[in-house]
Amino acid sequence: MSIAALTDVPAAGRETRPGLGRLALVELRKMTDTRAGFWLQLAIAALTVVIVTAIVIWGEAGDQDFRGLLGAAIQPASILGPIVGVLLVASEWSQRTAQITFSLVPRRARVLGAKLLAGVAWCAAAFAASAAVAAVGTLAAGVDDAWGIPAALFFQDAFYLATSMIGGIAFGAALLASAPAIVLYFVLPIAWSIVGSLSAFEGAARWLDGSRTLSPLVEETLSGTQWARVLTTLALWMVLPLLIGLWRITREDVR
């Protein structure tokens, strides 16, 4: 090929960087490429079906409407989904693939952004699947006036699921090690709940204890004060670890 022919190749064809959407698709694939990720997500799907089926068969009529079944259906994804988020980030270091990832995409903040986007996309798919299972369960239960759910509560269910996944990604990014991140993601909030039960910390616990501030998301339409407590809790348990993780990822030596 002549030099003239080479110079005729459009610049975009010679050198383009993958877009954030394409990077997110790669990160989504990473969620299921490992055996741990695959079986974890299969367990989430199976538990969702089992929980909804159990409520339909043995639950009380008040729990068998779409509102109650949807709140129950998202629980497996909200509890186990953060582990998927932790592994998505921390496994880059534990499996020693970070060097390859950052060689292909040198701007590390874009990689973390793609992981967050992939986590949100995973939550959207998980929420849609949970809603579908809840709808089937509602039809099977056949209770009266079963489909009424406030739009705000429907949004809160989706928000609850998304924040749990992002929290897992944040802890994985902050610690860059799978086992400690998974343990601390569950242990630290439990430990704070125990501390918050003491009368001296009661005031702070009302704003920073996720077991108190986040659980109403799937139970009732929140007031302005309740939303302020939710956002304060998330600032501590989600935003702060995410900022620490961003700092570490952009500066950590890759071996």
Image (cartoon, helix red, strand yellow):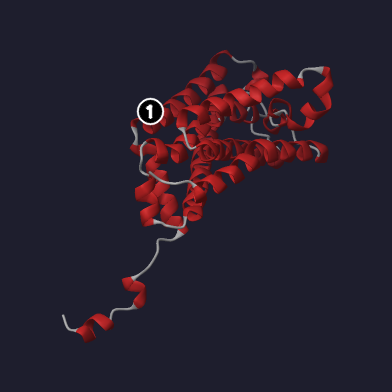
Residue 88 visible in the snapshot: yes
- Identify residue type, mark 1: Trp
Frontmost residue, 191 versus 128: 191
Percent position (x, y) of residue 113?
52, 51
Residue at left 48%, top 20%?
A: 50
As drawn, which residue projects farthest toward the left? Answer: 1
Left/right of residue 12 with respect to residue 134 in the rendered view: left
Secondary structure found at label 1: helix
As drawn, which residue projects farthest toward the top? Answer: 58
Q: In the rendered view, would you say 171 is above or below 7? A: above
Quarter of the rendering containing residue 232: top right
Percent position (x, y) of residue 60?
64, 15
Mark 1 neighbour density, 10 Å: few (under 14) some (14–19) many (20 or more): few
Frontmost residue, 45 versus 247: 247
Percent position (x, y) of residue 171?
55, 36
Quarter of the rendering containing residue 143: top right
Percent position (x, y) of residue 109?
51, 54
Residue at left 48%, top 37%?
A: 176
Residue at left 38%, top 28%?
A: 39
Is the N terminus in the top left, top right, bottom left or bottom right quadrant? bottom left
Q: Which residue is mark 1?
A: 39
Residue at left 43%, top 31%?
A: 41
Q: In the rendered view, would you say 86 is above or below 113? A: above
Residue 138 visible in the snapshot: no
Left/right of residue 208 with respect to residue 248 in the rendered view: right
